[in-house]
Image: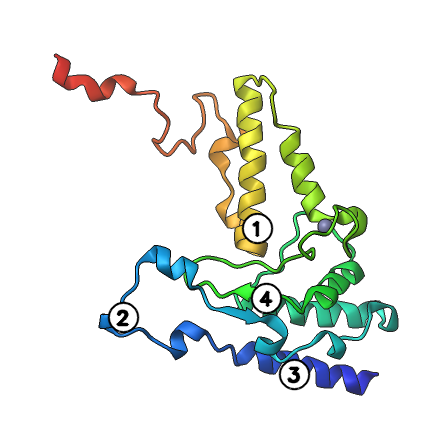
Amino acid sequence: MQRYLQQLLDDIDTALKNVSMPFIEHELSVHERISADEEELNLPIRNLCQWTGITQEMLPPAAMLTDGDVHEVLLAMKKMLGAYNCHFILQTEVPEALQYETIRQNLDQDVKVMQWFDGFFELCKPGTEHKKCVLGEYCQCAFYEELFSGYANEELTAEDERARELEIELQYIRRKYGDDWMKYYPYHLDKNYDDDSGNPYNYGLEDDDENKDDWWRK
Ligand SMILES: [Zn+2]
């Protein structure tokens, strides 16, 4: 198994280093310019297995691997997926064997190749009932639904509203920036970072100076 795993890790590494982005292969000439909307509609689609050369069959089931092996292959696969702009991002703590199985069992998926925006690995097959996917009780779609359903139709105090904004913003930046998310921490939304005179991280974006704009009335 060790020899096989080394070969597998080498293959994943090769895939990581040889990403071919379709829009770089076929650069548009000036005469072929298309609008942003058209570009969105015409995003190239790639099958992840064909594109990376890594297939589900190449990845041994987690049950056949030690925890250490799972850790190593999972890390390599996450890196590779990131290089293909198909980020594998979870919002909650999930055991590594389950993360690995989620990648393994969903690897055969078609992805839109995006040039300017982040793309994400689909964690559930379309149409899968919540919590019936590989992630089971860790199902991320169910997590999102619960998170947002809690927000419907409730009256919030200004303080709660701010706490909610913080929670949503944190979900977003964790997803967008992965391990680097702390660099983008929204201090201005966190009451723990307020000082006596309000929040020091107010970037001048609050509209507490509404009156400044009506100089023309005077
Ligand atoms: Zn799910």
Please report the residue visible at 53 percent of the width from the left and 32 percent of the height from the top. 165
Q: Is residue 1 left or right of residue 117?
A: right
Q: Secondary structure at mark 3?
A: helix
Q: Nearer the viewer, residue 54 or 10?
A: 54
Which labelled disc corresponds to residue 175? 1
Q: Secondary structure at mark 1?
A: helix
Which residue in the protein does label 2 denote?
A: 32
Q: Could you say which quadrant of the image residue 96 lies in?
A: bottom right
Q: Secondary structure at mark 4?
A: strand
Q: CA distance from mark 1 to mark 3?
A: 27 Å
Could you classify mark 2 by the number of other residues whose Cα lies within 10 Å: few (under 14), some (14-19), or many (20 or more)? few
Earlier-in-chain disc, 1 versus 3? 3
Tell me where residue 159 appears, x and y as whole percent: 55, 21
Quarter containing the N terminus: bottom right
Q: CA distance from mark 4 to mark 1?
A: 20 Å
At label 3, the amino acid type is Asp
Could you classify mark 4 by the number of other residues whose Cα lies within 10 Å: few (under 14), some (14-19), or many (20 or more)? some
Which residue in the protein does label 3 denote?
A: 11
Please report the residue visible at 65 percent of the width from the left and 41 percent of the height from the top. 144
Is the CB atom of the residue marked by disc 4 within 8 angstroms of ligand 1's nearest atom?
no
Dot in front, 4 or 3: 4
Q: Is residue 97 left or right of residue 143?
A: right
Earlier-in-chain disc, 4 versus 3? 3
Which residue in the protein does label 4 denote?
A: 110
Could you classify mark 3 by the number of other residues whose Cα lies within 10 Å: few (under 14), some (14-19), or many (20 or more)? some
At label 2, the amino acid type is Glu
Please report the residue visible at 34 percent of the width from the left and 75 percent of the height from the top. 27
Earlier-in-chain disc, 1 versus 2? 2
